[in-house]
Amino acid sequence: PAGDVITNRSAACELRAPLRAAPRAAVAMGADGAGGAAYLLHPLVLCNVSDHQTRVNVGACPNAGGRAVGLLLGKQSGRTVEVCNSFELKYTAGEGGAGVAVEQTFMEERTRQYKDVFKNLEVVGWYSTGGAAPREGDEGLHTGIFQTLNESPVFLLLDAAVDPSKRTLPVKLYEAEMRVGPGGGEPVAALVECTYSIQTEEAERIAVDQATKVSAAGETAATQLTQHLDGMRRAVKMLHGRVAALADLVRRMDAGEVPMDHSLVRRVAALARRLPALDTPDFRRDFLREQNDGLLTIYLANVTRGVADTANLVDKLNVLSHDRSARMHHARGGRGGRYGGMGLRSTRDRADRKDRGAMRLEAD
């Protein structure tokens, strides 16, 4: 896909009022499908379903009946349902995938385990592989065991038949709606196709980039990642070949099989001296010395930074202490109370002593 969101709309697609169990109420919809839920489908789900079907085809899933069945996990916010992940179920199916019997104990246990790991995800529906339309009995599965996990599940159907000529995804989503039975009898549930959009995230886009480039013939188209890795592989292979040829030539010159080329030997020796990965005592000693010098520089820088921070903290404490002393001095000299009266009392004592001294001089 060229963009982040691609909408897959079928020409015959028509949304109707989906079946909603209590306490939700059915939403009345017009012919244009207004009011239906908006489904966002992640590529990870498609990869999981395709991988499951591949293992069914090679016989890795016994008693599968040629079809893959599993649960869909996602998030629901209002009328928007985001299908993010999936996991397969244990089940048995008859010939051609008919008569699916799901192992309910395994389904409940695996659902609980996924809920413990992905707390923000819940069961939003189920998936199956098959043809272009639901099989007989899929309505019963949809409104039966899977509706016990979600009051309005969604059914994802993947067409396992590969048609390279088609340029649309072989995936359809279905919801259940109530229709009047034959002859105006009791209402019956029917699967109705609905629209969906492909929603991708950055991590998913990188992960599935290679898978989306694989053609039906098994040929992988070139991507930026594969081109980069292929270029690195060819460069390393070329370097390895040249080094091997040079080493063989030096070995043959040392054995006397070919004439000695002193200019070439000097160039080889200069190149070998430039290589840092030499396992010699001198190299290890020099390397450890440089490493210790670098670590010591980092340690001294951290110590200097710590001393500077400590000095700034001391300056701030001195400023706070000076301000506090000034406030206490002002409180003692200008206010009454416990400390303010001391200044007035001391002034009166000095005046009394001065008066008594003057009276003593007059008496003399």
Image (cartoon, helix red, strand yellow):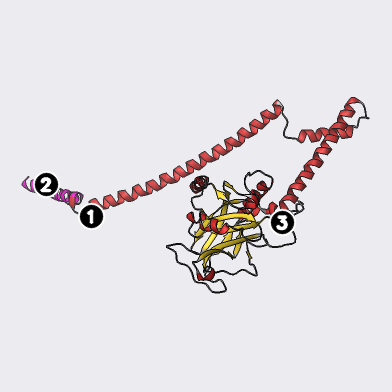
Residue position for label 3: 162
Q: Residue at x 31, y 49 (%)?
A: 324
Q: In which quarter of the image is residue 263?
A: top right
Residue span colored magenta: 338-364
Residue position for label 2: 357
Identify which amino acid the numbered label 2 is placed on.
Gly
User: Is residue 116 shown left or right of residue 328?
Assistant: right
Q: Residue at x 30, y 48 (%)?
A: 325
Q: What element carries label 3?
A: loop
Name the residue nearer the viewer: 239 or 216.
Answer: 216
Q: Residue at x 75, y 61 (%)?
A: 165
Comes first in the chain, label 1 or label 2:
1
- Find residue 334 and name its label: 1
Q: Give percent across and percent down for residue 262.
A: 89, 32
Figure quadrant of the C terminus = top left
User: Is residue 345 shown left or right of residue 317?
Assistant: left
Query: Does the magenta run of residues contain 117?
Result: no
Mark 1 vs mark 3, foreground winner is: 3
Identify which amino acid the numbered label 3 is placed on.
Val
Mark 1 vs mark 2, foreground winner is: 1
Alpha-carbon distance for marks 1 and 3? 96 Å
Mark 3 vs mark 2, foreground winner is: 3
